[in-house]
Amino acid sequence: MKTDYWNAFYSGNFTLDIPSQFCAMFCQEAEKGASVIEFGCGNGRDSRVMASHGFRVLGVDAAQSAIDYCSHRAGDAIGKSLNYLRGDVSELDLAPLREFSSGGKFYIYSRFFQHSISEEEQEAMLDGMDALRQNLAAAYFEFRNADDENTKKVFGEHYRRYQTPEYFRHAIERRGFKVAYEVSGKGYAKYFEEDPSVTRVIAVLS
Ligand SMILES: C[S@@+](CC[C@H](N)C(=O)[O-])C[C@H]1O[C@@H](n2cnc3c(N)ncnc32)[C@H](O)[C@@H]1O
């Protein structure tokens, strides 16, 4: 993980407080009151909105500055609907995640995270998801796909790894999950003048 890079990025210069289009889809579809573990929560723009719609959220991110920012803004909602944990997916401590997800149905939510991590980190994350499968209702993913490699970016310096939907599908199927929904293309994640090519996947236990 590019720790220094992301720590600097979230040290005050990224304060966008508008949720992603993917978050709107998730909040509309997922069962209200359920728990959500969000990997790569960044500045909390999506986790805060989920909490405001009745979800209990645990945001996980490796950047300490992002977690500090989220925790500070969560104020007295911390421990009730909003929880944050510093954690790198390549060395996940599953105990707090198990505890958080043990109370009933829960979701995994990962937005613009798969392309931000290496293949090895993705493997470790999906192993973690596999280990947490007991109460898992569904896992929601949105990531830049292989068709996005040459498009112009607002943040051109971010580390990005591009994968095809097929590649990702195989990675989850190898662990006994199946794709319940999948769509790819532009128009799903517009960001100012950028219109990335993304893939959305909802994975469930097969
Ligand atoms: C592109 S940002 C996405 C943030 C947020 N989900 C959003 O959509 O705005 C990627 C996030 O992944 C985090 N990250 C990168 N590598 C990580 C790793 N190995 N473990 C945990 N978090 C990581 C970064 O700190 C950053 O917050």
Image (cartoon, helix red, strand yellow):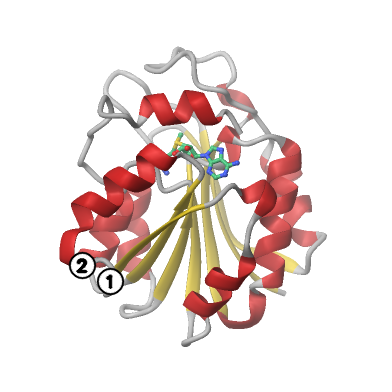
The three-letter code of the residue at mark 1 reads Ser
Q: Which mark is residue 81?
A: 1
Find out if the beta carbon at label 2 lies less than 8 Å from the nearest ligand 1 atom: no
Q: CA distance from mark 2 to mark 1?
A: 6 Å
Which residue sits at x=38%, y=49%?
22
Which residue sits at x=17%, y=59%?
75
Q: Position of residue 126 (x, y in %)?
A: 69, 56
Residue 175 falls in image quadrant: bottom right
Q: Quadrant of the N terminus?
A: top right
Secondary structure found at label 1: loop
Residue 135 falls in image quadrant: bottom right
Which residue sits at x=52%, y=79%?
99
The three-letter code of the residue at mark 2 reads Ala
Q: Quadrant of the C terminus?
A: bottom right
Q: Position of residue 138 (x, y in %)?
A: 54, 70
Judged from this view, the residue extending furthest toward the bottom is: 103
Secondary structure found at label 2: helix
| Mark 1 closeness class: few <14, some 14–19, many ≥20 residues within 10 Å | many
Eyeballing the image, is 133 above or below 147? below
Q: Is residue 124 left or right of residue 33?
A: right
| Mark 2 closeness class: few <14, some 14–19, many ≥20 residues within 10 Å | few
Eyeballing the image, is 162 above or below 114? above
List the residue tagged with mark 2.
Answer: 77
Which residue sits at x=59%, y=47%?
88
Q: Which mark is residue 161?
A: none
Find out if the beta carbon at label 1 lies less than 8 Å from the nearest ligand 1 atom: no
Label pair 2/1, CB-CB below 8 angstroms:
yes
The answer, for residue 188, to whether it is visible in the render is no
Judged from this view, the residue extending furthest toward the right is: 174
Q: Position of residue 43 (x, y in %)?
A: 32, 42
